[in-house]
Structures are given as structure tokens and as C-alpha cells.
């Protein structure tokens, strides 16, 4: 599967390890059981540090996913609504999608998705969040960008399989929209809430101190 290059500035931050972190598993054998566009599945035979073996451990592989918290100069967030066949429901979502093999970096993929799905673009961009949909069973990450000061550029150009409705929601109404179950996609709720927290709270002080030692009870 082709991979989108990830510039160093877009690599996810790594939290310092704890001294008693579990050790990685050893891969005894690995093979692909399917290598299709939307169904690439790897079957691993793994050995745990304890010696226990799991003969069949299934991992789904995907290219990186991208999404955008796009905010206009009128303090509105550009959202979409679309039908999701897995649940058979319609909810609010961020403009989002998978990266393409031809994308030069993650931000270019996110810019393309925003413009294709909503017609909006421009503004000032920064990486907001890096998350995993399921770190136990998937190998990819979702990169959410914050685009501030976006404007309407042209008519949206969604793919033939996409039936989208674009909505401009004031940021003051986002939290109530989350509380009222307007969103169902966790990978979209998390960056929205982080964005709202950034607006409400002072910038946290970055610390490089070592992780704390375990409590006596946990250290026994």
C-alpha cells in the first residue's frame, strides 16, 4: 500500500516512557490475508514478553486519515452531514478523508479534502491533534488540522459516492451540539473539544520532567 510522506513537523509527539512500561511483542510470523483498497488485513503470530503466544492476531492497515477543524472569520466552524452506512445514520462531521498516494504531505491531503467536500480553503493552518481510531487493531493515525480564517472559494466537488450537506455552525453552539448527540464520530469530537479547550484555557506550560514513580501499592 502506498504511503503518504509525513514531514518531521507533522510527526505525532511521543510521551516519555515510564520505567515499568510493558515491552513490545515479538512477531514470529506475518502474512497478508487481503490487500484491497479498503480491506487490507494482516495476520500476525506474536509472542508476548511472558512467553505466551497468540497464533492469530489480526491487524487492519490503512493510509493516514486527515480531518479539519475549519473556522471562518465569522467564528463559524465548517461542518458536513452525511449518511454513514455502518450505523445507517446521519450526523455532523468534520471535513475528512483518507490521504491519497499522490499527496506530498498530510496537510496537502487535508486541504484537498476540505475544498472538495465544502468549497472552503485558505486561512492559517496548524496541526491540532493526532489520534488512533483503535491502536489495538489498526496501524494508522488520524491527523486533524486547525484551519483559521478559511473562506468560501468555489463550489464543492465531492466524490460520486459522497452525498454531503455543508453547515456553518457558530463555535458558541459546538459544545451543546456535542451534548445533544449531534456527533457520533469520536475522532471528530476529540479535536473539536481540544479546540474549544484551547480557546477557553490559558496555554499550558510544557514540561519535560520524568514520569512519576508508581505509588507504593502499584509498585508492589
Image (tube, grey):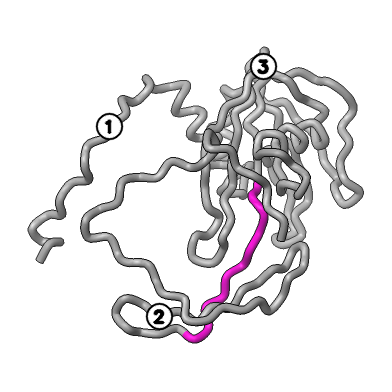
| 63 inside magenta stretch | yes
Q: Which residue is mark 2?
A: 47
Q: Is residue 147 above or below residue 99?
A: above
Query: Which of the numbered marks, if any, corresponds to residue 207?
Result: 1
Sequence-wise, which precedes: disc 1 or disc 3?
3
Q: Which residue is labeled 3 in the image?
A: 149
Q: Which residue is more in the foreground, 186 or 178?
A: 186
Q: Which residues are magenta?
A: 55-65
Between 5 and 97, the residue placed more toward the observer is: 5
Which element type, helix, strand or loop, lies under badge 1? loop
Seen at 62% across and 24% down, the residue is: 125
Let me know if residue 15 is in the magenta part.
Answer: no
Q: Going from the N terminus, do you reach mark 2 or mark 1 first?
A: 2
Quadrant in which residue 206 is drawn? top left
Compare residues 193 and 116 and report the one nearer the observer. 116
In the drawing, does residue 40 fall left or right of residue 195? right
Amino acid at each position: 500500500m502506498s504511503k503518504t510522506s509525513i514531514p518531521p513537523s507533522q510527526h505525532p509527539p511521543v510521551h516519555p516512557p515510564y520505567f515499568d512500561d510493558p515491552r513490545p511483542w515479538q512477531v514470529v510470523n506475518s502474512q497478508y490475508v487481503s490487500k484491497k483498497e479498503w480491506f487490507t488485513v494482516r495476520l500476525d503470530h506474536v509472542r508476548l514478553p511472558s512467553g505466551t503466544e497468540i497464533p492469530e492476531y489480526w491487524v487492519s492497515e490503512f493510509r493516514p486519515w486527515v480531518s479539519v477543524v475549519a473556522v471562518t472569520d465569522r467564528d463559524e466552524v465548517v461542518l458536513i452531514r452525511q449518511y454513514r452506512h455502518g450505523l445507517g445514520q446521519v450526523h455532523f462531521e468534520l471535513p475528512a478523508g483518507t490521504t491519497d498516494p499522490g499527496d506530498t504531505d498530510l496537510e496537502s491531503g487535508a486541504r484537498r479534502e476540505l475544498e472538495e467536500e465544502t468549497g472552503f480553503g485558505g486561512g492559517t493552518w496548524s496541526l491540532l491533534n493526532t489520534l488512533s481510531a483503535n491502536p489495538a487493531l489498526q496501524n494508522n493515525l488520524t491527523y486533524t488540522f486547525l484551519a483559521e480564517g478559511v473562506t468560501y472559494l468555489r463550489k464543492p466537488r465531492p466524490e460520486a459516492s459522497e452525498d454531503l450537506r455543508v453547515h456553518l455552525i457558530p463555535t458558541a453552539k459546538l459544545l451543546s451540539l456535542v451534548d445533544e448527540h449531534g456527533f457520533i464520530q469520536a475522532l471528530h469530537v476529540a479535536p473539536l473539544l481540544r479546540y474549544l479547550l484551547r480557546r477557553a484555557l490559558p496555554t499550558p506550560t510544557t514540561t519535560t520532567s520524568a514520569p512519576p514513580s508508581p505509588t507504593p501499592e502499584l509498585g508492589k
